[in-house]
Image (cartoon, rainbow, N blue to C red):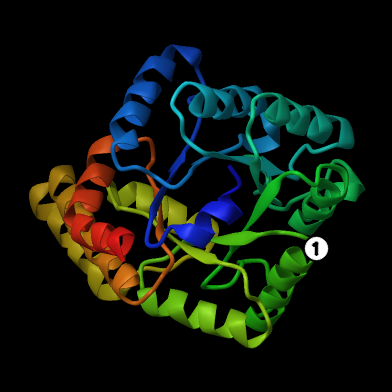
Amino acid sequence: MKISELLEHNKPFVSLEFFPPRERVAWPGFFDVVRNLKTTQPLFVSVTYGAGGTRQTNTLEIATRLKQEYDLEPLAHFTCVGASESRLRAFLDGLTDGGVENILALRGDPPRGEQHFNASDGRFSHAVDLVRFIREEYPHFCIGVAGYPETHPEASNSARDLDFLKEKLDAGADFVVTQLFFDNALYFDFVSRARSIGITQPIIPGVLPVASLAGVKRMIGFCGATMPKAYLDDLELVQERYGDAAVRGLGLGYAQQQVRDLIEHDAPGVHLYTLNKAETCLEIVRGNQDLLDAGKKG
């Protein structure tokens, strides 16, 4: 089913993001995580796409299995990195054959070791190019795009970044999933500014539960997100005094409260970046089950 249709009738909700293991030997453990997290009843599950298409086949096969074997609604990522019309058609045809109806169109990050994005095919230099192609050539797909509450790191300013987001939506995208953030005020301000320029599509907040201090520092440095100083100071303190388990505990509590605040203030739902870890996400959902259940009853 199309995510755009699901969003019309389900609020609040939880959705999840998985990344395909590089090696097939890791797939059994990956699907164990999927089975555990299926109990959260996610509205949809996104499947990331390797840089340069390095895991394109994995993304396609896993998205199809999630649909056919696990009765989940997949959102398959596709990026401009290494994109060509033939590769895009092969991917979209494969999704269609597998019954997958949803795709997240992204420009993508430069391949490892490269500082700047260089399109291999000038027709697919930006996410909006993917959106236009998919909407024109494969109109049956529901299309999601990314949004940046703290502005894309390559954008000249926040207003211009919002203009680019609107361009993607005007080209045919159906909804937005945000980059991770740790201050909910950033999300609500982002939504307000988007609405003020005529963006009406759903904007789903993306939340990352911190499980590793080193890991989150790498991620925020890479994507341009920031972390409240008090929260970062607390993470560094517990890391120094008590170690990794304490960091995970603090990250869990922070993410639980972040999710609760988002739902209480009328975010349509929450997209959890799982890092293929089940237990933390299970605990976040359990900690907010009352709000999720109340919304369904309402």
Image x and y of residue 44, in percent: 48, 44
Q: Which residue lies furthest to the bottom in this view?
A: 196
Position of 129 with respect to 62 (left or right) is right
Image x and y of residue 104, in percent: 64, 48
Question: At 58% across and 72% down in the image, what residue appears?
Answer: 151
| SS for dot 1 | loop
Question: At 78% across and 58% down in the image, what residue appears?
Answer: 128
Q: Quadrant of the C terminus?
A: bottom left
Question: Measured along the vertical axis of the image, is residue 101 above or below residue 30?
Answer: below
**Residue under circle 1?**
171
Which quarter of the figure has residue 287? bottom left
Question: Measured along the vertical axis of the image, is residue 76 above or below residue 228?
Answer: above
Position of 192 with respect to 286 (left or right) is right
Position of 30 with respect to 90 (left or right) is left
Amino acid type at image mark 1: Ala
Question: At 88% across and 43% down in the image, what residue appears?
Answer: 121
Position of 289 with respect to 195 (left or right) is left
* Residue placed most toward the observer, 248 or 73: 73
Question: Measured along the vertical axis of the image, is residue 108 above or below residue 179?
Answer: above
Q: Which residue lies furthest to the right in this view?
A: 122
Image x and y of residue 187, in percent: 45, 74
Q: Which residue lies furthest to the top in this view?
A: 25
* Residue placed most toward the observer, 185 or 69: 69
Which quarter of the figure has residue 86? top right
Question: At 80% across and 35% down in the image, what residue appears?
Answer: 88
Q: Residue furthest front?
A: 297
Residue 255, can we see it?
no
Residue 140, can we see it?
yes
